[in-house]
Image: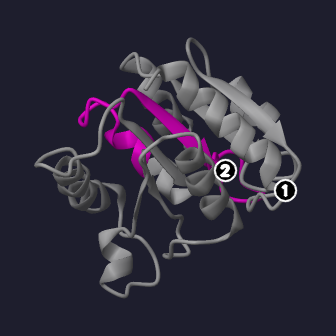
């Protein structure tokens, strides 16, 4: 799994750390990746095209050479990182996408939907799983579920945009990656 952060620009946090450790404990190789804009000290991510262009070679490098990540390849991220994972899954031939708190829309602005990005893996035949906090102001589990079809599904957990009750989060992540094989 290649796991990345949200628009806050840093790795860590209770949710990302719990997922990474839970998957390592289950025998998965997890690469936690700071996105290029965060490494450069920017406070906010760039527009999608330059962000994705910087992300692609990082993941490709992790999948090559003697120390490459084994398959299957699962792209994962929190919030903005989930968006990047969805947008680049087909180009990277990912086997699955795990979205942690997908930002379906800005808080209070459901008319500004990012559902088109969320649907991209499914359109390419790539399974996607969304773990969404029941009180997430960027989109409730019901709102996210209404935008998906096919192999995609959603797990609702207690929390808002940062999921602090990590047991159900890790269980959902493990169930999804285990469904892909190892």
Q: Position of residue 129 (x, y in %)?
A: 60, 31
Left or right, residue 174 beside residue 73: right
State the count of labels. Answer: 2
Residue reaching furthest top?
150
Crowdedness near tag 2: few (<14), some (14–19) or many (≥20) residues, C-alpha within 10 Å: many
Please give the residue where the numbered disc 1 appears in the rendered image: 165
Q: Which mark is residue 138?
A: none
**Alpha carbon separation for disc pair 1 and 2:** 13 Å
Q: Residue at x 30, y 84 (%)?
A: 40
SS of the residue under disc 1: loop
What are the residue bounds of the magenta stretch? 84-113
Q: Which residue is mark 2?
A: 101
Image point 56% across, 55% down: which residue?
Answer: 20
Q: Residue at x 85, y 55 (%)?
A: 159
Image quarter for residue 13? bottom right
Q: Is residue 130 above or below residue 12?
A: above
């Amino acid at each position: 799994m290649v796991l990345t952060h949200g628009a806050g620009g840093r790795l860590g946090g209770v949710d990302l750390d719990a997922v990474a450790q839970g998957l390592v404990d289950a025998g998965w190789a997890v690469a936690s990746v700071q996105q290029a804009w965060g490494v450069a000290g920017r406070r906010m991510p760039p527009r999608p095209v330059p962000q994705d262009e910087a992300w692609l070679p990082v993941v490709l490098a992790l999948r090559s050479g003697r120390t490459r990540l084994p398959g299957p390849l699962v792209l994962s991220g929190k919030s903005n990182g989930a968006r990047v994972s969805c947008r680049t899954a087909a180009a990277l031939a990912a086997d699955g996408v795990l979205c942690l708190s997908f930002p379906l829309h800005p808080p209070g602005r459901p008319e500004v939907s990012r559902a088109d990005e969320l649907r991209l893996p499914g359109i390419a035949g790539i399974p996607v799983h969304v773990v969404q906090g029941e009180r997430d102001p960027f989109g409730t589990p019901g709102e996210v579920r209404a935008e998906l079809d096919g192999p995609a599904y959603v797990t609702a957990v207690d929390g808002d945009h940062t999921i602090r009750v990590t047991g159900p989060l890790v269980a959902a992540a493990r169930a999804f990656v285990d469904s892909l094989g190892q």
